Image (tube, rainbow, N blue to C red):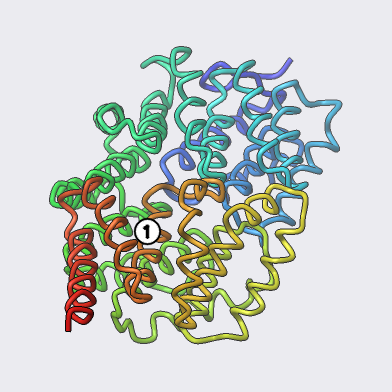
């Protein structure tokens, strides 16, 4: 009949040691601490027939967004499918979600996780993996609603209950419900001060509301909770750098980058994305970052023809454009254009958003600001379709405004700056955009008068 995990959800194994190993690995994964991937691999080495272990491993790989991990994903999927006669319905559902992802149907994978959670609302692994995949796909409403659907089925007595409030907080923030998001995020942190995702969700709220000093305080006073031995720490450091960048504290930005975002070479896709995104924001402001671009571009080089998840491809394009590698940029564009022809999820994401975004980045690097504006102007309302958060996708808005200013489209730049200052009236960056647009209009008007 099998055992049940700590949340009362069935597993097919009768090996208590394997189940305890899974619980340990999952606990690490929930908080992004340690190495949950290595932890579950150690369990599976001892018990290769542990079906739910393979399911959990597959879910973690899906959430990585890395094409290089596809062989490992296939191994996990086939390990479960080869033991289907021993698997229970829950495990078969996990395997079906992983198979859909492996086949390129990312959106179908999240739908299957949704069906699983309807049947097993306390399936913490399904919820965690679905939440991260919803983030990768830009499914903002599901970031909120998927957690809402199961939250009443949990309580303080269920292990990991606090993590649900952290996930819910992020979903609420992405849907613009900032007050409720902050309340839920703070509640999660009260329950578990080490809830890195909840701390990150509140940091998002403060970023979106332009509460820069509060954001710095929120993160810096909790550094010991979320930073040591944490696989997500680089992203919270990235958020801290955004607060400093908004007010022009460039020395703090570069220090955080060197010490915490990119302290050593790494090929982890999400770390590369954050590093590239921060340097591109500096690039837009004309800041010389030395050889930092070369490091990122060198790391992206082996991946430039591996179109798999276009949100990552766009950040590779930024590195190649900023480091003046036209050949590499051309190969990324060719790869992205091929991806746009595919009938899978990444193909749809690429056609809708990724391809025009990459074309805009390429045009910006060539000084073709008019094309940059053309590609980005109508893209922002649908930009969520290729993943990331509002804070991450703001790079498209910043690129658009900068391109409009450089192309002399000052009326457009002024209207976009107005949008920004109304949205975030305490953001110095928005007011700088508005001042530059006004100066351009005044200079043009004076020239005509003369």
Left or right: 444 with respect to 46?
Answer: left
Left or right: 394 with respect to 450?
Answer: right
177 to 239, vertically: above or below: above
Left or right: 214 with respect to 315?
Answer: left
Residue 350 pos. (x, y %)? 64, 56
Q: Secondary structure at mark 1?
A: helix
The mark tally for this picture is: 1
**Closer to the camera in the image, 114 or 429:** 429
Q: Quadrant of the C terminus?
A: bottom left
431 to 170, vertically: above or below: below
Taking the spot 52% from the left edge, 36% from the top edge, the residue there is 131
Q: Does the image show residue 249? A: yes
Residue 272 pos. (x, y %)? 48, 66
Taking the spot 51% from the left edge, 26% from the top edge, the residue there is 146
Residue 135 pos. (x, y %)? 50, 43
Taking the spot 58% from the left edge, 59% from the top edge, the residue there is 354
184 to 418, vertically: above or below: above
Q: Quadrant of the N terminus?
A: top right
**Closer to the camera in the image, 292 or 245:** 245
Q: Does the image show residue 283? A: no
Left or right: 413 with respect to 272?
Answer: left
Residue 262 pos. (x, y %)? 38, 70
Q: Is disc 1 surrounded by few (<14), some (14 to 19) or many (20+) residues within 10 Å?
A: many
424 to 296, vertically: above or below: above
**Closer to the camera in the image, 53 or 122:** 122
Circle 1 sits on which residue? 234
């Amino acid at each position: 009949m099998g055992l049940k995990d700590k949340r009362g959800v069935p597993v097919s194994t009768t090996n208590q040691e394997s189940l305890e190993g899974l619980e340990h690995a999952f606990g690490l994964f929930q908080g992004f601490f340690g190495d949950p991937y290595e932890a579950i691999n150690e369990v599976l080495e001892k018990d290769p027939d542990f079906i739910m272990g393979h399911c959990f491993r597959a879910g973690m790989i899906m959430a990585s967004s890395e094409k290089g991990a596809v062989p490992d994903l296939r191994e996990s999927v086939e390990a479960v499918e080869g033991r289907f006669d021993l698997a229970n319905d829950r495990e078969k559902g996990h395997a079906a979600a992983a198979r859909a992802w492996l086949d390129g149907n990312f959106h179908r994978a999240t739908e299957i996780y949704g069906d699983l959670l309807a049947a097993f609302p306390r399936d913490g692994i399904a919820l965690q993996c679905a939440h991260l995949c919803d983030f990768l796909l830009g499914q903002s409403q599901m970031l909120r609603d998927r957690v809402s659907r199961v939250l009443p089925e949990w309580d303080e007595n269920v292990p990991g209950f606090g993590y649900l409030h952290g996930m819910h907080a992020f979903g609420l923030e992405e849907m613009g419900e900032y007050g409720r998001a902050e309340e839920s995020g703070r509640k999660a942190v009260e329950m578990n001060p080490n809830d890195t995702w909840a701390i990150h969700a509140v940091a998002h709220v403060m970023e979106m509301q332009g509460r820069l000093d509060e954001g710095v305080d929120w993160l810096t006073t909790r550094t010991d909770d979320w930073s040591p031995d944490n696989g997500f720490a680089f992203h919270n450091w990235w958020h801290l750098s955004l607060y400093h960048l908004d007010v022009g504290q460039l020395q703090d930005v570069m220090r955080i980058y060197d010490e915490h975002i990119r302290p050593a070479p790494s090929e982890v896709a999400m770390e590369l994305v954050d590093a590239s995104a921060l340097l591109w924001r500096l690039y837009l402001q004309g800041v010389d970052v030395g050889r930092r671009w070369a490091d990122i571009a060198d790391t992206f080089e082996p991946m430039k023809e591996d179109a798999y998840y276009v949100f990552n491809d766009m950040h590779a394009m930024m590195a190649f454009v900023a480091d003046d590698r036209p050949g590499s940029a051309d190969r990324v564009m060719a790869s992205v254009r091929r991806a746009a022809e595919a009938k899978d999820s990444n193909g749809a994401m690429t056609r809708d958003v990724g391809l025009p975004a990459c074309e805009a980045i390429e045009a910006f690097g060539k000084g073709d600001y008019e094309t940059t504006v053309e590609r980005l102007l109508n893209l922002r309302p649908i930009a969520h379709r290729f993943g990331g958060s509002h804070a991450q996708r703001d790079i498209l808005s910043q690129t658009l405004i900068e391109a409009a200013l450089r192309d002399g489209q000052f009326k457009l730049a002024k209207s976009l700056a107005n949008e920004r200052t109304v949205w975030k009236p305490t953001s110095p960056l928005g007011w700088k955009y508005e001042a530059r647009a006004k100066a351009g209009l005044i200079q043009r008007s004076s020239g005509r008068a003369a």
